[in-house]
Image: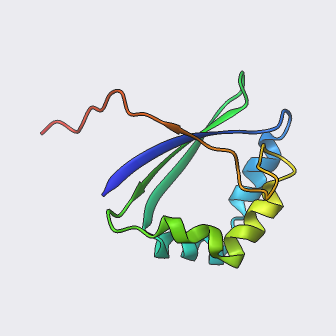
Amino acid sequence: METIAFRMVLNPGMREEYERRHAQIWPELVDALHNAGVRDYRIFFDADSHYLFAVLTRNTNHRMDELPQLDVMRKWWDYMADIMQTAPDHTPLQQPLELVFHLSSLS
């Protein structure tokens, strides 16, 4: 398993809508993420900067690189494009984050 993190940007005033849409995430999108090897996915919000900080855990043999070719992923990105910063094709703009500290559980 590996953990990655990245930053996205939510448009001002869109937090409640972002949360509402994610509370109703499509089951077929959840299946696609799980099938691609995603095991845990968390998104945090910084109200001062409007940054979304995503942290996900995935299998080392994940297939996340195949997600952009899936219809359900493209539809989700189209659905989210009006409330967050995206590229012209509606892919969310993402900035990878580098790990600078990790405290593992103590036994």
User: Which residue is depicted at the point 86% across and 35% down?
Assistant: 13
User: Which residue is depicted at the point 82% across and 62% down?
Assistant: 79
5 displayed left or right of 52? left
Along the viewing direction, whichever of 46 and 9 lies nearer the viewer: 9
Examine the rendered structure and indicate whether residue 18 appears above or below residue 15: below
Location of residue 89 (image quadrant): bottom right
Residue 36, percent from left and from top: 48, 71
93 displayed left or right of 90? left
Examine the rendered structure and indicate whether residue 76 appears above or below residue 5: below
Examine the rendered structure and indicate whether residue 59 appears above or below residue 42: below
Location of residue 14 (image quadrant): top right
Residue 48, percent from left and from top: 72, 21
Residue 100, percent from left and from top: 36, 27
Residue located farthest toward the left when viewing the structure as drawn: 107
User: Which residue is depicted at the point 70% across and 50% down?
Assistant: 92
Quadrant where the image shows the N terminus: bottom left
65 displayed left or right of 28? left
Quadrant where the image shows the C terminus: top left
98 displayed left or right of 81? left
